[in-house]
Amino acid sequence: MLTTLKRIVQEVNQVLVFDEALSLLALRLKEATKVDCCSIYLANYEQQCFQLKATEGLSKSAIDNISIGFSEGLIGLIGQREEPINIDDASKHPRFKHYPDVKEEQYHGFLGTPIIHQRKVLGVITLQQKVRRLFSEDEEAFLVTLAAQIALEVVHAQARGAMDNNSNLHRGTWQSTLRGVPGSEGISIGTGYIANRKSTLASQPLMKSDDPEGQCSLYREAVLQTRAEVQDMSERLALTLPEDVRAIFDMYQHLLDANSLGREVEQKIHDGWNAVSALKLVVEQYVKTFRDMDDHYMRERAVDVEDLGNKVLAQMLESQIAEERLPERTILIAEEISASMLAEYPPQALVGIVSMRGSHNSHAAIMARAMGLPAVMGLTDVPVSMLGGKHLILNGYSGEIIVSPDANILQEYKLLADEEVELFRHLQKMADLPCVTKDGQEVKLLINAGMSMELENSQSDIDDGVGLYRTEVPFMLGERFPSEKEQIELYRSMLRFNPDKKITMRTLDVGGDKPLPYFPIHEENPFLGWRGIRLTLDHPEIFLVQVRAMLKASLGLSNLKIMLPMISSINEVEEAFRLIRQAFYEVSEESKLSGETLHMPQLGVMLEVPAILYQLPQLAAKVDFFSVGSNDLTQYLLAVDRNNSRVSALYDSYHPAVLLALKGIIEQSNALNKPVTLCGELAGEPAGALLLVAMGYRSLSMNSHSLLKIKWVVRSMDSGEIQLFLRDILSMTHPQDVRDALNMKMETLGLGGLVRAGR
């Protein structure tokens, strides 16, 4: 049954036109289950009904002409209950509704299951039998499994607009609104550009072409170039490889022959596919054939065929990629955006970021906010390759991407972008004003830094220093660990930028969603694995070099603070501080020769692992300050991977449990007389800052682009009045209620512009 399931899904996935794919699915499902009828209904939420889209057994004339209301009949009941229904005689069921045009009077046995994706009912699949009978548990399990498998394909088709206009899909001129996760606020209009594309047949979408001769020429030229490449490889390795391995190159040449792959690829091109799609279809069929063979040696050849297909593909795309220029207004698109990837492109050309992986608080989103770039994360509805070269509107507030917008929509979003500019002009007027509440409470605003551009672009007359310097970013941009000398130069430039302001440097925090390319870590659950202080304590040679570099960079200065990430026990603090004192002694001895003064920096820890919240009194006796990392703290409190788009909706900094934890931290810190800064993304959100100041936080660290917005929030509130409002907030049980209340409060404080921008 599993083999049958795989075969059906694979065959259906190769059909480009969505309605044809549904028809094939109904046919293959009917054949596999040996039933008398199979039908597929899809949900239309605008009309609140299920529409018959494909059938094998009912009247074909009913396709697209029969609509069943969400609360009508057995189909509606399946949608309402969101579970399978198995009935021995459907006509006797109280919810049965007769539709004469469908002509299903002859059927009695009925099995139906919903198609669901991320809690949303997309449609219903039904099996019907002429005889009166209940379907078996195996049949029911098979149908449920198939429905789960095709759910994502239905989502992809809806996103591409395929169900509305299949002909547009062939030419790539479709307009559609895609939905991801808001990553960084703002509106941007530009052209999609695929970053660091790795050409594999698996990543290529199926596309049609009306130029078969041109596509055949493209394929033949790519084959000639691949032949030459394979021949060159064979000659270079002739003396180092055994004969049986060299035989693989002979097989490559055979497959490249016009009478082998070539004939079938060109036939697919003449059937209407473009060269890439034709190659993809033929190679994938060969790969499947080899993998299904009993002989182990022949099964292994599937990898060779796949590799050869990717070589031909690379040749076809090489000239196209080489001629591709960066658009004037580039919206960078990738499976996952990294710091090193961003460093490859001139910042003045980038106007937005789209990352297929990640969520609002993933590292990529944090970098986007630091650079002031609108971003959408967790976009799973379409393949990356379908957005390259498309005209896009990116809405970082809602997480929407409008593909190929028409003139009216384009004009509407241009007006929204102009409103953003006007809001920024308004904020600039308070740049020189102090950051104090109406009742005189001073709030320090610091910046989160990590890329040199952040510090250079920050307005030094606004911020009160650096609350978090992410030292891992320079580590992530290189091809090796930076030397002590390189780190000294980098940290010195940071400390000397404004020697009168404190710079809090966090020791290396890699792992999780921040891997090092030259130090790969492969774990089942990286966020609960070897990251942060755990890694550096296991590698004291890395930790000591970094701390020595920080201390040497601070010679003659007194503004360095050192902070430890991912602390979960007092023992980790004691061990790390022992190493820091060792480094301090070594640098002190060396500095005596130069006559420069070395000050012992203040030492602190990040509060982001829930366990440490229960050890604050013991921790306070050992450190100089606390810093709350609300991003990871939220992640660990709610047990939600903040990079996983499937559960990103569950990651919520306004969850009552998170708010109570933050309130508890500031109350304990004040009682222990220990300074505390909150440096998570919550500090840079207007509603978040309002809450934090109400709780008692007086030091907030954020990306530099949020400073003016948060200063406006602080200057608009009375801390005493807002504390009364906080009591109501902390009694709420749902995060959305918290948000609604905060938005209403901001409106009454005259901060409606920030609320409307956030929407």
Image: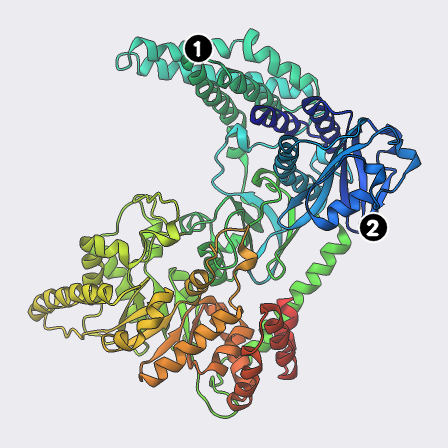
Label of residue 251 in the image: 1
State the residue at coordinates (64%, 82%).
750
State left or right for residue 408 relative to residue 288.
right
State the residue at coordinates (44%, 56%).
363
Question: At label 1, which amino acid type do we have?
Answer: Met
Q: Is residue 98 above or below residue 215?
A: below
State the residue at coordinates (75%, 39%).
163
The quadrant holding residue 145 is top right
Q: Residue furthest top?
A: 259
Q: Nearer the viewer, mark 2 or mark 1?
A: 2
Q: Is residue 378 above or below residue 279?
A: below
**Does residue 155 appear in the picture of this structure?**
yes
- Work out whether residue 3 or residue 360 is closer to the camera in this orientation and state it: 3
Q: Provide residue 266's location: percent of width, then percent of height.
A: 63, 15
Label of residue 47 in the image: 2
In the rendered view of the protein, which quadrant contains the N terminus? top right
Q: Is residue 415 above or below residue 134?
A: below
